[in-house]
Structure formats: C-alpha cells, structure tokens
Amino acid sequence: MPTSPPHALSHAIELIRRTSVTPEDGGCQDYLESVLAPLGFARRRVDAGGVTNSVFSRPGDKPGCLAFAGHTDVVPTGPLDAWPHPPFAATVEDGVLHGRGAQDMKGSIACWLAALEGLLAGAEALPTLQLLITSDEEGESVDGTIRIVEHLEAAGQLPDAAVVGEPSSLREVGDTIRRGRRGVVQGTIEFVGKQGHSAYPDDADNAVHLAVGPLSRITAIDWGQAVDGFPPTSCQITNIEGGTGAMNVIPGRCRVTLDIRYNPGIDYAGILSRITDACAGVEAVIALQHQANAFSTADGPLLDDVCDSIRRITGVQTRRDTGGGTSDGRFLAAAGVPVVELGLTNDTIHQIGERVRIDELETLTRIYADIITHFEVQA
Ligand SMILES: [Zn+2]
C-alpha cells in the first residue's frame, strides 16, 4: 500500500478558510493554482456570469486524459450560533475536521491535490490530467461546469473520463460510487375556473374541483419500471394552492407544483405528453421545466477500474448507485464523457456542523492516487 501524502488535511483547511458561499469562489481557485502551478499545471479561466471557473491541465507522458471535476462553492451556513465550531474556521478536534465544505466538497478537492503531489514527486508515467473547477454548483448551475464543458468541446479537449468528487460514500469511503443520476422535471399546473359565491355554484366554476380529475390521473400514471440500475420514475405533487381563504368563495384558480425524478426509461418529451394527456378536457396552464437530464455511465472499464482501486486501498466492496439529486456530472455525461462520482461520506452535507474524519481524507487521497496511476484510455 502506498503511503499517503500528509497534505490533504492542510489543503482542506486552506480551502474551508476561504469563505465561498455559492456562487462565490472566495479565492479557492487561486489557492489551487498556487498548489498546481509548481506541479506543471496551466490554468485557464472560463469565468461566466460572475462565476469563477478554471481548467487546470497538465500534459501527460502516456496516452489518455483523466479529469477531476468539482466545485469550490458551498451552501449557506444557516444560523451561525448553531454551529459547534465556526463554519469557516476549519477547526480540527479529535481526528475530525469541522467546517462548511468539509464533505461537500472541499475535502475531496484537497484529496485530489494531495494525490497529485504524491504522484508527481515520483517518476511514474501519468496521463494528461485536468481539474475542472467551478464556483457554481450549489446554486443555479447555469454558468458553471456547463461552460467549462462547452469550452473544452470547442477546444477539442474533452477528457476520456471524469471523476466527480461529490460525496458519494455512505458509511466509509468507497462503499458507494455514483454511476448516474436521475433527471429532474419541475413546474406548475394552474387550473383555471371562475370565482364565485359558494351559494351560487351555477355562476362559478370551481378550479379545485377541476383539478381533482387531472391530479388523480397524474398520480395514477404508470411511469414504468426501474431501468439500468435506476429506481422507477417518480412524480410527486409537492404543493396545492387554491381559494381565497374565505369559506364562502368558490376558487377560480388552483395551482399545483410537481417534482418529477425520472430514469432513462423516459425523457422530457414523454413526461410532458403524459402530464398534458392527464389534464385533457380541463383548462390548465402547464409550465414544466426540464431542470436536469438523466445520465448514466455504462458498466465497463471506468467503473471497474475505480472499484478495483477502492478494493486495493480499503478492501471495501463498492455499490454502484444512481441515487441522490442531480450533479454536475450530467454536463460531462451529456458531452459523451464517462463519469463516475467518488468522494467522502455524506452524512453531514449541507447540515449545520458539517465535518469529516481526517482518516477519510487520507483514505480518499490514496484511492484517488491509485485511480490516476492505473488510468488507461478506453479502447
Ligand atoms: Zn457538492
């Protein structure tokens, strides 16, 4: 087993201390440059819409290009006085590093840096390496990784594979990787009737009553089965709003919100047509938005190699999962890049008191180094 470089913890501390609530970068990517430039990486800025984006790249001494993709922004802290340690102080106590971003995902960026430092100190032949880093993952994600991918596509420099450092692990590092994510469709349906006095229903058209038929049809839609390791598509009604608040007024409008998580067995057009069919015969304004594409990386060399690396370092058998929300991996996958998500444990992400065990940083650093060392271009 290779010895782990001691630097992951210090990089994580440096990054957490640079306050970077989305879409701020807080100087994190300048810090990355200060570490990576001496290792032979060039930085290209791909800033867009006030978002800091960087491509760090280093030419390889063997074929193939492996990217690490990640984000330097973090979610807001919530009430500061509820934090046991200040969220941007990066306090180390009893083998645990405390701070916003410790798990999601400054910690894993720190591990990739430490892995590179360890490898580049040796003489081993390495592939071309990229770090694709944005400060817009936790927010809108409209000027982040998607802009980096567009830039790489235009330059003909898309990587052969990408490791996304999102915290994929459940109980111990490497027990779970993500090989895809469900897609997301969200939006509203507004049922339109006519407001009136509830004692005079003939002069009104109750929008809540109009909604009942379509909503029961929507909840009864058969979205199909689990496919390709994904859970079944699910459509949840997340809000119903109608009426004026008065007991004696028939509502003229009823507004419903939907959240649909879909697997690759259906696409946006298919979802839209099912919802539209369910509302047939009723005046309804349907405003759905396709928030994120479903994506998946097929079983094959990338996933196998990553699982092999995890097993060599930890002995852990890895689950290949597609759960959770969406991730920036979707933008790389949409460009045809095989993507795997592997990071720290995720039990405190986005929470008050986010933290990570320091031994996890060391383990993930060794796994990342093993992945880089064994990376081969896919035939
Ligand atoms: Zn994240």
Image (cartoon, rainbow, N blue to C red):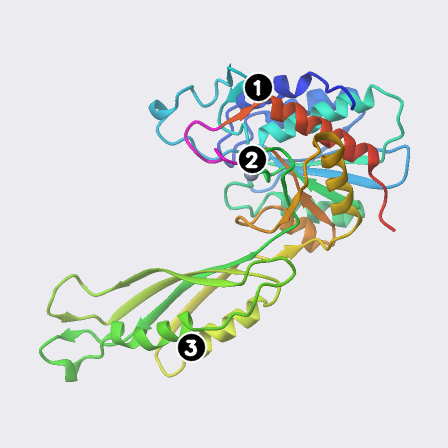
Q: Which residue is mark 2?
A: 171
* In this rendering, position of residue 208 left or right of residue 43: left
Residue in front for this viewpoint, 238 or 142: 238
Q: Tell me which amino acid carries mark 2.
A: Arg
Above or below, comparing residue 79 to residue 198 in the picture: above
Residue at image position (72%, 32%) is 368
Tag 1 or tag 2, which sits nearer the N-term? 1
* In this rendering, position of residue 263 left or right of residue 118: left
Q: Residues within 10 Å of mark 2 (few under 14, many from 20)?
A: few
Q: Is residue 347 found inside the magenta-colored segment of the image?
A: yes
Q: Quadrant of the N terminus?
A: top right
Which of discs 2 and 1 lies nearer the camera? The answer is 2
Instruction: Look at the image and tell me whether residue 50 can be seen.
Output: no
Residue at image position (31%, 73%) is 211
The segment highlighted magenta reads 345-354
Element carrying mark 2: loop
Q: Which residue is mark 1?
A: 13
Residue in front for this viewpoint, 166 or 206: 166
Tag 3 or tag 1, which sits nearer the N-term? 1
| Inter-mark Cα distance, 2 to 1 | 23 Å
Q: Tell me which amino acid carries mark 1.
A: Ile
| Inter-mark Cα distance, 2 to 3 | 42 Å
Tag 3 or tag 2, which sits nearer the N-term? 2
Residue 346: x %, y % from top left: 53, 36
Instruction: Look at the image and tell me whether residue 214 can be seen.
Output: yes
Q: Tell me which amino acid carries mark 3.
A: Ala
Element carrying mark 3: helix
Residue 212 sits in quarter:
bottom left
Residue 315: x %, y % from top left: 71, 33
